Image: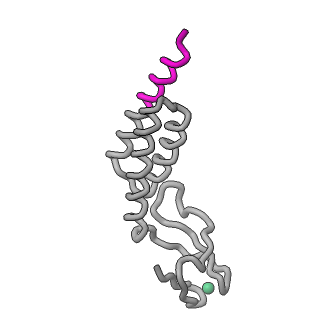
Amino acid sequence: MMITCDRCGYEGEGEEFRMIGNVMCCGPLVFRECPSCKNPVICDRQEMREDIEDTARDISRRIEAAIHCGDAAQARELLKDLSFLNQCLNLDAINDYVREKKREVSRMERASTAP
Ligand SMILES: [Zn+2]
């Protein structure tokens, strides 16, 4: 992915531009720093969408595995990661999935702490 700085015109690979942070907490845009003039450059994460979707699928598989093993803490961590990822995907299906799995994990936790 090539990025062009809109201030100095420096053009480079995405890795050369250090990631500074999100433009909005839940938006699809990220700030990157131009290595030449330190100008913050806004990049659209659309091109990364496929990668993010792959990662989301991978995480949901690990959530299933964690629930299967009864590892509630691990499942909770993974659900947190998945909802964070969904900030760039904004998929209702993932929101529903996270909500449903959280309920499942809560039930597991209650069952494991019951005398
Ligand atoms: Zn620049």
Q: Splitting the image into 4 quarters, where does residue 95 fall?
A: top left
List x then y, in percent, for residue 8: 60, 90
Q: Splitting the image into 4 quarters, where does residue 51 fall?
A: bottom left
Considering only vertical position in the picture, is 36 above or below 30?
A: below
List x then y, in percent, for residue 13: 53, 82
Is 42 in the magenta?
no
Of 29 and 12, nearer the camera is: 12
Of 103 and 67, nearer the camera is: 67
Of 45 and 23, nearer the camera is: 45
Residue at 57% x, 76% y: name it. 15
Instruction: Pick out the residue farthest to the front.
Output: 69
Majority secondary structure in the magenta region: helix
Residue at 59% x, 86% y: name it. 7
Please tell me in which quarter of the rendered image ligand 1 is found: bottom right
- The boundaries of the magenta stretch are 102-115
Considering only vertical position in the picture, is 72 above or below 38?
A: above
List x then y, in percent, for residue 78: 50, 43
Considering only vertical position in the picture, is 7 above or below 89?
A: below
Is 114 in the magenta?
yes
List x then y, in percent, for residue 114: 53, 12
Considering only vertical position in the picture, is 47 above or below 84?
A: below
